[in-house]
Image (spheres, rainbow, N blue to C red):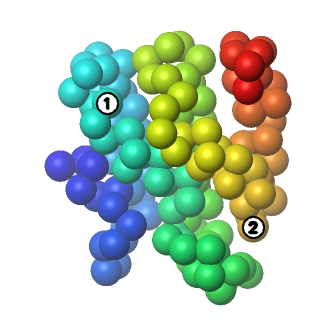
């Protein structure tokens, strides 16, 4: 149910619902890691919430929708990096790629947060990054 709210193809996504669903999935991941693991790609897609293609990312640059979805992207960075640091999830699939894309986000706050988590605690945890 929570993962369904995170899908990017919803007609009118509610930012508050997406943010809360993401945080709840993060909490569930701590308690029931194996059950939530299959939803990790959807959770990682929240690192680019609000834009599903590169064209849309550039189109939304400076728009209100992009700034509104920045909260979801920031929550995704903080939640996923916390789960990575505590070894609840591993670097699999497109997770690393999505972190790199988030570090070049059009929102300056999102980009700096992603860069700080990648170059700080995540790099010290896994020096092979």
In the rendered view, does 97 fall on the left or right side of 45? right
What percent of the width, then of the height, locates residue 83? 50, 24
Per the rendering, the mark at residue 37 is 1
What percent of the width, then of the height, locates residue 120? 80, 25
Q: Are marks 1 and 2 in contact (CB under 8 Å)?
A: no
Q: Residue at x 57, y 68 (%)?
A: 68
Q: Residue furthest left?
A: 1
Q: Residue at x 34, y 72 (%)?
A: 9
Q: Give the alpha-carbon distance from disc 1 to disc 2, as whole Å.
A: 29 Å
In this view, 104 is above or below 122 = below
- Crowdedness near tag 1: few (<14), some (14–19) or many (≥20) residues, C-alpha within 10 Å: some
Q: Quadrant of residue 114?
A: top right
What percent of the width, then of the height, locates residue 2? 25, 47
Mark earlier in primary sequence (1, 2) = 1
In this view, the residue in front, 41 or 24, is 41
In the rendered view, does 41 fall on the left or right side of 74? left
Q: Is residue 64 visible?
A: no
Q: Residue at x 75, y 67 (%)?
A: 106
Per the rendering, the mark at residue 100 is none
Q: Which residue is label 2 attached to?
A: 106
**Please, what secondary structure does the residue beneath circle 1 have?**
helix
**Please, what secondary structure does the residue beneath circle 2 have?**
loop
Q: Quadrant of the C terminus?
A: top right
- Crowdedness near tag 2: few (<14), some (14–19) or many (≥20) residues, C-alpha within 10 Å: some
């Amino acid at each position: 149910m929570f993962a369904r709210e995170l899908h990017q193809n919803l007609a009118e996504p509610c930012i508050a619902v997406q943010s809360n669903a993401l945080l709840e999935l993060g909490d569930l991941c701590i308690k029931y890691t194996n059950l939530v693991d299959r939803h990790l790609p959807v959770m990682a897609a929240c690192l680019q919430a609000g834009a599903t293609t590169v064209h849309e990312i550039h189109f939304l640059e400076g728009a209100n929708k992009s700034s509104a979805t920045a909260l979801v992207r920031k929550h995704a960075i903080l939640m996923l990096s916390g789960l990575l640091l505590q070894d609840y999830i591993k670097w699999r699939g497109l997770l690393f790629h999505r972190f790199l894309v988030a570090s070049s986000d059009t929102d300056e706050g999102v980009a700096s947060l992603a860069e700080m988590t990648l170059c700080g605690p995540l790099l010290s945890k896994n020096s092979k990054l």
